[in-house]
Image: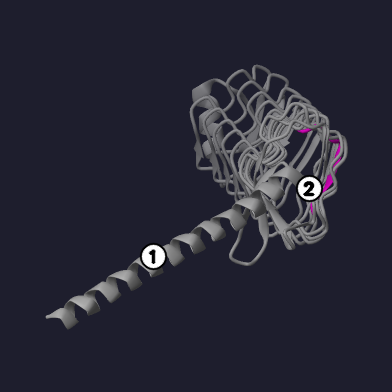
Amino acid sequence: MKTTMKESEKLYRKTIINFIILFVACQIAFLIVLSIVYGIFLKYPFLCRIENDGGVTITKYFAKEKKVDIPEYITGKPVTGIGFKVFLDNKKLTEIILPSTLKWIGGEAFSGCWCIKNIDLPDNLIAIGDEAFRGCSDIKNINLPDNLESIGSRAFKDCRFDYIKIPKSVVRMGSGVFSGSSLKTVELSSLLPEHTFSGCTELQHVIIPDGIERLEEYTFSGCSSLDNVVIPESVIAIDWRCFSNCTNLKKMIIPEKIETIPYACFADCVNLTDLTISDGVLRICGNAFEGCIGLLEVEIPNSVTYIGERAFSGCKNLKKITILQNVTEISHGAFDGCDNLIIYCHSNSYAEKYAIIKGISYVLIDK
């Protein structure tokens, strides 16, 4: 019995000693970590996170300096990321120096920093998050690096630089990347998502590269300074309102591979005077050319079978439109407000019957 009690006492003492050793070790470890973190904080006004790949992500900025120089290394590890909203709405920041080790910039990282005047994106950068630079209206020039792969939605919305070249390395772009910006000239890659340049009222020159197959909704909507756009033969589809309110657009050739001119695609392009619809187009949808008051004459190719509701309504200066035999449906109000219009059509065609019913003047042409 005494032996058992002695063994229990020894085990108890051993447990207490082990607990004390563990407690002291934890305290020492805590002090070491605290000293490292505190040392980093004293040297750099950042809160950081070490990622699984060994890189460091800046997660918080505490100071209020006008110029911020982010180091390439913190505690010997490369700074590879700037996290979500790190500098959001920082109105004091005028210059940011990014490290060459940087690979990604998180969503809204610099959004609302409208006093930033200078920023150079490093060559190793591969991703820019959603709204990362939204509203940075004082940045007058920015170069996208050749290794960049991804640009998030509205990343440069409402920025004020004049020129941008999108590198061929970019394989992903979100919607509205440059919407509302003051761009004048653009060099595109093979991507053109929805709303990319919507509301870019100063955009004058854009070359859509051959290879792009689709122009998405609102891509150039509201680009009121854009006077000429060439749609390459590779494009097989245009989405709705793609060029609506391009009030300075004067000429448009719609290639033969595009089967449908969608809803309001060219609505309110008031200076559009030279329109060519290639043979191959099947449908002209509702409001497609509504309000295009510069149009005087339009020839609908033989491939077209359908003209949608209010497709040419409000084209008050349209005097002549040629509609051939294959058109089998013209929807309500297709030519509302075209008071001086004469329809040129074949005898016994749907277009002739439509003209008679609607009281529109028409002239018969040879078959």
Label drawn at residue 211: none
Residue 160, magenta (yes or no): yes
Between residue 94 and residue 341, name the one nearer to us. 94
Q: Count all numbered tags in the image, as a single digit.
A: 2
Viewer can see residue 127: no
Q: Toward the viewer: 14 or 348?
A: 14
User: Above or below — where is 315 with respect to 134?
Assistant: above
Residue at image position (80%, 47%) is 230
Which residue is at 45% across, 66% downward? Answer: 21
Residue 160 location (% of width, % of height) = 81, 31
Magenta residues, as a range? 159-166
For the N terminus, which image quadrant? Answer: bottom left
Whole-number angstrom distance, CA of label 2 to CA of label 1 = 43 Å
Residue under circle 1? Answer: 19
Task: Please indicate, yes or no, whether residue 262 appears anywhere in the rendered image.
Answer: yes
Image location (x, y in percent) of residue 53? 63, 67
Numbered label attached to residue 70:
2
Type of amino acid under label 1: Phe
Q: Residue furthest bottom?
A: 3
Name the residue nearer the viewer: 219 or 74.
Answer: 74
**Residue 295 versus residue 29 in the image, above or below:** above
